[in-house]
Amino acid sequence: MMAVKKSSIPSFGNDLEEREFWTQHSVEEFADELEELDVTIKPARSEQIAVRLYKEDLDALQELAKQKGVGHTTLARSVLEHWIARARGKAPMRPARPRTAEPRRKQPNDALQPTRPPPARRSRG
């Protein structure tokens, strides 16, 4: 029976712990623990749109973004990109959160999720 080697890359409580670890270690030290990933790298975003909001909606967006530790345009883009991906059938149920210093455990706001139109009614007769 083969002994299972325990990973020597620790779990990190936050980004600062991970950053400190990697300043003292090289990824080459852990080459036997790494695995290939199938990653698609998209080109940088290049298109812009203007969105007009009511002042109270902009204020609410800015407050929500502040609570999440991101900029309001980053939050708006993240919500919009997720909504579009969901509408196209290409996204998970939960939106991807922008990276913050500390992870959040909040559930997404259902009001921000794409809605489906009601089923068509059949006429009687």
Image (cartoon, helix red, strand yellow):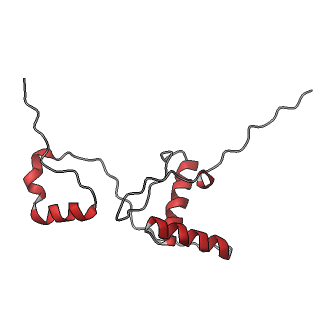
Q: Using the image, determine if residue 86 lies above or below residue 77.
A: above
Query: In x, y percent, where is residue 13?
Result: 26, 56
The single residue placed furthest to the top in the displayed view is 1
Q: Using the image, determine if residue 12 lies above or below residue 36.
A: below
Task: Indicate the quadrant containing the N terminus: top left, top right, bottom left or bottom right.
Answer: top left
Query: In x, y percent, where is residue 101?
Result: 34, 65
Could one spot residue 53 in this view of the protein? no
The single residue placed furthest to the right in the displayed view is 125
Residue occupying image coordinates x 50% and y 65%:
75
Task: Indicate the quadrant containing the C terminus: top left, top right, bottom left or bottom right.
Answer: top right
State the residue in front, 60 or 25. Answer: 60
Q: Is residue 60 left or right of residue 71?
A: right
Q: Is residue 17 left or right of residue 108?
A: left
Q: How many marks?
A: 0
Q: Is residue 29 left or right of residue 44?
A: left
Residue occupying image coordinates x 43% and y 53%:
105
Could one spot residue 11 in this view of the protein? yes
Query: In x, y percent, where is residue 67?
Result: 48, 67
Residue occupying image coordinates x 10% and y 60%:
26
Q: Is residue 107 left or right of residue 25?
A: right
> Could you say which quadrant of the image residue 3 lies in?
top left
State the residue in front, 13 or 41. Answer: 13
Query: In x, y percent, where is residue 2?
Result: 7, 27
Residue occupying image coordinates x 42% and y 62%:
98
> Could you say which quadrant of the image residue 123 lies in?
top right
